[in-house]
Image: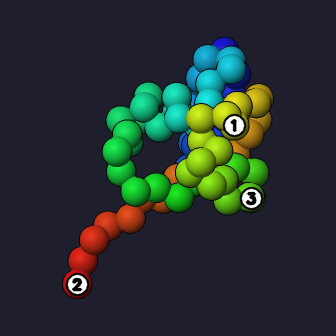
Amino acid sequence: MIQCHINGQATRIPEGHSLTDLIEQLGLSGRRLAIELNAEIVPRTAHATVTLNNNDRVEIVHAIGGG
C-alpha cells in the first residue's frame, strides 16, 4: 500500500494503482472529470497508463451541468 493525497485527504491505495483504478475505486467512473497530479493536468487519454506513487497529490474535479 502507498499513501496519496486525494483532494487534500491522505488516502492509502494499492501500489501500482493507475488513475483509472482510482476513479473506479472512488465510484466516479463514467463522469466528466478533470484530474491534476502533482500540479499537472493529466489528459483523459493517459488515465489508464499513469501510475500513482507514494505521496502523490491528486485533485479530482467533476463537471456539473447547468444552465
Residue at the front extreme, as displayed: 45
Residue under label 1: 50
Q: Is residue 36 above or below residue 3?
A: below
Residue 33 appearing in the image: yes
Q: Of label 1 and label 3, which has the lower sequence position?
A: 3
Q: Which quadrant of the view contains residue 13?
A: top right
Q: In front of the other: label 2 or label 3?
A: 2
Measure the C-alpha gap from mark 2 to mark 3: 29 Å
Q: Is residue 35 left or right of residue 41?
A: left
Residue 11 location in percent, x, y? 58, 31
Q: Which of 4 and 64 is in front in this view?
A: 64
Q: What residue type is labelled 1?
A: Val
Query: In percent of the image, x 69 and y 37: which residue is there?
Result: 50
Q: In this view, does 61 lie above or below 15?
A: below
Query: In percent of the image, x 53 and y 58: which residue is there?
Result: 34
Q: Of label 2 and label 3, which has the lower sequence position?
A: 3
